[in-house]
Image: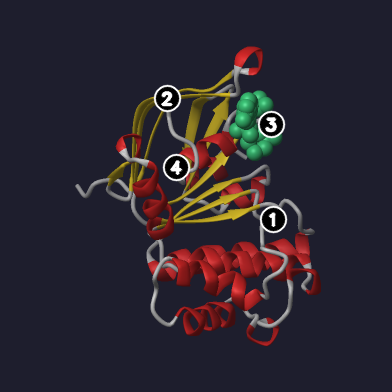
């Protein structure tokens, strides 16, 4: 069998210092296949966002093994970790995180250019067209609707053609009518490009669209359901 796209083994992580130190991930083990879509669900504070940060190489596990897209992240230095992030993962956040002083085009093109990609602006234009924003490339974030801003963030995440797309409450700041096509866009892009998709969500509808749902509670994985079982359970 091919190596899983993501393999976590007994991952522990504490954050904060002194009395504020919190043991957040308490022995998380999880395998995700290449091309799979997985929804991470669970109560507020259960460690979902922290887990996503570990998968994206934005937080480093204290103990355990974190293999993502062929790299063992726990052993990487800062430079290698930055290279891993630029090459292997795209991340979409609830609050979009666009750079306010850059146009939509620059928000997508500049990170590509910094990563040394050739034709960064042409590729950025193509990615923005693919999310339906061909006529908004010169708009600044404040000149875009919330849904449009999230489309720019998705174009930016997809532009380096990463193996893995991570999304943390990607529709959390959007109403239902605006969020639904954003979700369609992410699933479609991942299917077309054979990307692995991991979505943290409170939205049961969104979780149900994933091939598998992983449930967290108090820093541990407490259950996993594949899509048919989830539907039958209702
Ligand atoms: N930098 C930090 N320092 C200390 N504690 C932290 C830090 N970041 C997160 N925590 C704590 O870790 C726990 C898990 O946080 P996390 O953001 O992963 O939860 P979550 O499951 O994503 O919750 P939500 O659904 O509300 O977004 C929380 O109790 C939070 O207060
Ligand atoms: Mg969270």
- Answer above or below: position of 102 versus 51: below
Mark 1–mark 4 distance (CA, rounded to whole Å): 20 Å
Q: Is residue 122 above or below residue 224?
A: below
Which residue lies under the disc numbered 4? 55
Q: Dot 3 corresponds to which residue?
A: 44
Residue nearest the observer in this picture, 129 or 187? 129
Question: Residue at the spot x=60%, y=23% of the render?
Answer: 16
Q: Would you say 194 lies left or right of 189 here?
A: left
Element under disc 1: loop
Residue 159 in sight here = no
**Nearest the eye: 104 or 192:** 104
Q: CA distance from mark 4 to mark 3?
A: 19 Å
* Distance from the alpha carbon under mark 2 to that under mark 4: 13 Å
Would you say the residues marked 2 and 4 are in contact, meaning their CB atoms lie under 8 Å apart?
A: no
Q: Quadrant of ligand 1?
A: top right
Camera-side mark, 1 or 2: 2
Q: Nearer the viewer, mark 1 or mark 4?
A: 4
- Give the residue number, with chain letter if any, for mark 2: 62
Identify the element where label 3 is drawn: loop
Rendered view: 194 above or below 205: below
């Amino acid at each position: 069998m091919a190596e899983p796209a993501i393999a976590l083994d007994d991952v522990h992580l504490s954050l904060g210092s002194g009395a504020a130190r919190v043991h957040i991930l308490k022995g998380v083990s999880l395998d995700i296949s290449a091309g799979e879509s997985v929804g991470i669900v669970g109560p507020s504070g259960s460690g979902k966002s922290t887990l996503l940060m570990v998968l994206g190489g934005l937080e480093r596990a204290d103990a355990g093994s974190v293999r993502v897209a062929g790299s063992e992240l726990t052993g990487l230095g800062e430079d290698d970790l930055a290279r891993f992030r630029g090459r292997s993962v795209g991340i979409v956040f609830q609050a979009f995180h666009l750079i306010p002083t850059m146009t939509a085009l620059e928000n997508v093109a500049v990170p590509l250019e910094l990563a040394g990609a050739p034709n960064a602006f042409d590729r950025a234009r193509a990615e923005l067209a693919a999310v339906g924003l061909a006529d908004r490339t010169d708009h600044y974030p404040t000149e875009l609707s919330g849904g449009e801003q999230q489309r720019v963030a998705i174009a930016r995440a997809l532009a380096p053609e990463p193996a893995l797309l991570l999304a943390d409450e990607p529709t959390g700041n959007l109403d239902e009518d605006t969020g639904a096509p954003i979700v369609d866009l992410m699933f479609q892009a991942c299917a077309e490009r054979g990307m692995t998709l991991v979505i943290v969500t409170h939205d049961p509808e969104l979780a149900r669209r994933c091939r598998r749902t992983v449930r967290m509670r108090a820093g541990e994985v407490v259950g996993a359901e594949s899509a048919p079982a989830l539907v039958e359970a209702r």
